[in-house]
Amino acid sequence: MHNALRIHKELLEKWRKAMDLVGPGPIEHHFEDAKQAVDHLNATGNWIDLGSGAGFPGFALAAYHPKAHVLLVESRQKRAQFLKRVISQSGLKNIELFHGRSEDIKSTFDGVISRAYKQPLAYLKDAKRLSSPNARTVLLLGGHNYFAPPLSWNLLEDWQYSISTGQRRRLVLCESMEQDK
């Protein structure tokens, strides 16, 4: 495991209950899921992780893709405090936090990712607003959830993977068609 993610895991174990970060039980599968979700992205440029919560998948994106700069977005105070602590202790230089709502962000990004931000169509609407031309948007879904992007989106990749808990996950990678922005 990447050293920054080891620090993330230690802090998550310490603060998970006090800050309502993840549910009960083991946490390894969260890290495994995040790694698999970002593994093949070849992410570069500016990326945004909407609704970062406990830091998934944004920390994995920053750790495994040092040429990407990742902005974590979290509106909840407790979770934002946790994310600040992890950023400061992780040693990662390509990650920062925006404590607020995504609607307040005026910049655009080369990539948009989220694990549990909003329902897919609402997420795509926000992703389109935050996307630079040719940006990639990653939707992370439960493995059995069927989802076809609307016609205003170009499907680049759709694949399923499993994590050690037996859960199936699905990643849909797409880009907004420029004329619809």
Image (cartoon, rainbow, N blue to C red):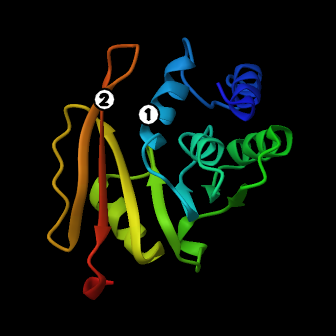
In the image, residue 129 sits, relative to residue 14, either above or below, namely below
Q: Residue at x 26, y 84 (%)?
A: 180
Mark 1 in CB contact with mark 2 (< 8 angstroms): yes
Residue 51 image label? none
Measure the C-alpha gap from mark 1 to mark 2.
Answer: 8 Å
Neighbour tally class for label 2: few under 14, some 14-19, many 20 plus, Cα within 10 Å? some
Q: Residue at x 45, y 30 (%)?
A: 33
Q: Residue at x 77, y 39 (%)?
A: 86
Q: Secondary structure at mark 2?
A: strand
Q: Residue furthest bottom?
A: 179
Q: Amino acid at mark 1?
A: Gln
Q: Is residue 32 left or right of residue 59?
A: left
Q: Residue at x 22, y 67 (%)?
A: 154
Give the residue number, with chain letter if any, for mark 2: 161
In the image, residue 160 sits, relative to residue 63, either above or below, namely above
- Which percent across, then down, holds residue 153? 23, 69
- Which percent across, then down, holds residue 126? 41, 68
Tell me which corner region of the image, top left, top right, bottom left or bottom right, holds residue 100.
Answer: bottom right
